[in-house]
Image (cartoon, rainbow, N blue to C red):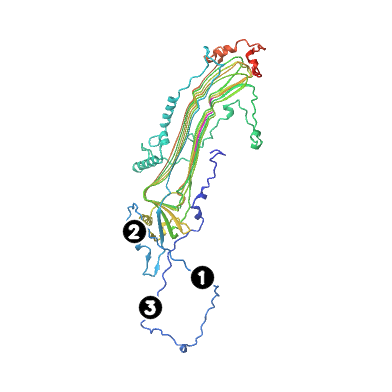
Amino acid sequence: MQAGGFTETIWHFIGYLHLADSVARAPVFYEGDPPPPLSPEPPDPGHEPLRGLAFDELVSVPSNIPEMPVSEPPTAAHLAPMPPPASILSLPPPFFRLPVKPLPPPVEEVGWVGHGHSVERVITVEYREADTQVDLGIRQVNLANDRDLVTSDAIRYADGSVVIPPELELGAAFGELVEQANEVAPDGILDMMTVLQADTGDLADWVSARDARWAETGSPNPDGGAPEPAPEGRIVDGVTGGPEPYVPTIIEIAPWRPEETEEASKVTEAEVKHEVVGPTEGVATIAETGLNVQINAAYVFDASEAVGSMMVGGDYYYSRGIVQTNILVDNDHVDIAVSGALAPIVRTAGNEAHNIAEFVVHVSNIDVQGAAATPHWVVDVVFGDFYDVKSIVQFNGLDDNDRTVQAEGGTYYNLGAGGNQQLNLTEIYGIGRYDIIIIGGDYYRGDWIHQYNIMLDPDYATLYSTGSAQDDTSVTTGFNSLTNNARIESYDATAFKPMLDPHHDLMVLLADGATVLTPHADWDLYGSASGRLSILYVGGDYYDLNVITQVNFLIDGDQSIQASAKEGTEQGVGAGGNTAMNEAIIIDPGLLSTSNYLGGDTYEEAVLIQVNIVTDSDTVAIHDTTTLVPELVAFAEHAAQEPEPECPSAPVPDPAQHDHLTSNILV
C-alpha cells in the first residue's frame, strides 16, 4: 500500500457493523419464569372452621404493630394501562429441506404449561422471503492501439527513398508469453485466461468442486498435496520480510529532463503561472517512446457475514489464495555511430519485477449472548442455496509499437510518442444486516486474488552524431517496472463450537416454520436488546466468495533513428521506463464472536504462488562514423558536403504576381 494512494484507509471497520451496537451492553440472561403462587392452606377436619366474628365478641388484646413507611403518591407511569399481550403470528409455515434430526414436539405443545396457572415466556417468529443475495460481477477493460509513425525527409536510403522502419510483428511472440503465464497456476487452480473469462457462477462451481474433492480425499489439490496454512508476514518474491522493491526514477529513464527540486515541489497551485515556457537547452533531438503506465487497483470490504452468531449444519470451507506472475522480455538493440570524442551513455538494464503478498489474520474473542431474551424474531428465508459472490476483473491491454525518425534541424525537437496511461479502480463495500445466520447445508468461503503482468519490450535505437566531448547522447531502453501487490486480511473467532441438541432443535423448528419458540439457555446466541432479532435462514448451501483478477498486457516494440551533424546537439532516446502495477486488498471480517456452531467438519487452506520470469538480452554497438548502418549513409554523405554560401541569392519574383498588393510579402 502506497502512502497517499487510494488504499490509504483506516481499517476500523467495526464501526460499520451492526454487532458493535450491542457488544458494550450488559448481557441479558434468561433466568426462567417466576414460581407459581402458593396454594391456600388445606382444611383441617380436626378443627372447626372459623366463622365470622361479631363485633361484640372481639376481645381487646394489646398488639405490637410496626410502623410502615410512607408510600409515594402514584405517578403517571403507575397509572398507565398495561400493554396488550403480544399476538402470535399465524403465517403459513414455508417448506424447507429438513435436516436429518427428528422433529421436536409439535408447536401447539410448546410454550404453554401448568394447569392454566401460568404462561411460559415465548418468542414469536415472523417469516419473509429474503432479498439480500449478492451476485456482483464487475469488469473493467482498457484496450489501446497506439502505433505511432514519425519520419524525416532528411534521412534517406542510398537510393533516395525516405527511411521508414518496417513494423515489428510481435503477435506470435506475445502469444507464447500468454501461454507461459497460463502454465504458472498448478492443476486445481484457475489459470489466467480461465479466471479472466469466468463469471460468478463459474467461480461458485469451481469452489464447490474443489471443496468436494477436499472432503472426499482430504486434499483440495488433484495431486493429493496437503493444504497449507496461511504464511505469516509480508512476503516479497518468496522471502518473508523482504526489502521494499526499488522503483526507477524519471531521471534514470529520461536523464535530459530537468530534475524537480524540493523548493519547486512546495509551490502551491495558486502560485503556478500558466505560461508556455520554451526549452532552454538549445539544439536537441529527443524521443520518448516508452514511459507507458498500466495500473489496476481493487479494494473489497466484505462484512456481510460479520454477524453475532452463526449456525452451520454441514461443513465449513475457507480457502484463501494469491497468485502473482510477472513476465518480461526486454531484448534491446542499440547501434551508435559517433565521431570525435563523444562518449554516449547507454542503459539497457534496470528492470524491476516484484511480487508482494500478505495474509493478515486477526483473532476476535467477542463473547455475546441474549437471543433467548429477544421476544420477536424476523427470519428471512432462502429455500435453496444462498450466494454472496463478488467478482472484479480488471484488464489493461496496450499495443504501442512506435517508429520515429528524427534529424537535427537547429531546434529543440522533443518527440513524445509514448506516455500512455491506463487505469482501473474499483472499491466494494458490503455491510451485513443480520444478527444471526443459520445455514442448513455447507458454508463455502473464499478470498482469491489473481495478478498478472506480461510485457514484451524489444527496442531498437540507431543514432548518428558528430558531436564533441561536451555534448550529451543518452539512450535508455530498460528501467521497466512490473509489480504485483496483494493483501488478504480476515477477522475471525478462534473456531466453531459443536452444535448441541438445542441448536439442532432450533434449526428444525425454523425449518418447519414454527411461529412460536420456547427459549433455551443453551442456545447461547447473540441477541439484540431492541426486542427484535434479524435472522437469515438458508436451507441449502452458502457461498461467500470474493475474487479479484488483475491483468496487464503491454507490447512496446519501439524503433528510433536519430541523426545529428552539428556539435552542441543533445540526443536522447527513452524507449523503456514502462510501468505495470496491480494492487488488490480484500478485508473479510467473518466470525467475530465466539457464538458460532458447526454440525460438520472444518477445512481451511491458504495458497501463495509468486513467479517472476525476466528475459533481458541486449545488444549494444558503439563505433565510429566510418561503419555506418545503411539508414544513415545518405544523411552522412549529405552532411559532409560543402556548406551553402553565407549570402544566398534571393529568388526572382514572378512579374505576374506584381498586380497584387501583397503578392511578394511571403516570398
In front here: 121 or 612? 121
Q: Which residue is mark 3?
A: 42
Magenta span: 575-583
The front one of 33 and 197 is 197
Judged by depth in the image, the label closer to the viewer, 3 or 2, is 2
Q: Tell me the mark number nearer the camera, choosing from 2 and 1.
A: 1
Is any atom of residue 235 visible in this view?
Answer: no
List the residue tagged with mark 1: 79
Identity of the residue furthest to the front in this view: 659
Identify which residue is drawn at 52% across, 81% down: 64
Secondary structure at badge 2 equals loop
From this viewpoint, is residue 62 visible?
Answer: yes
- Image side of residue 204 versus residue 250, left or right: left
Type of amino acid under label 3: Pro
Disc with the residue nearer the chain's start (2 vs 1) = 1
Q: Compare marks 3 and 2 and give the one earlier in the sequence.
A: 3
Image quadrant occupied by the C terminus: top right
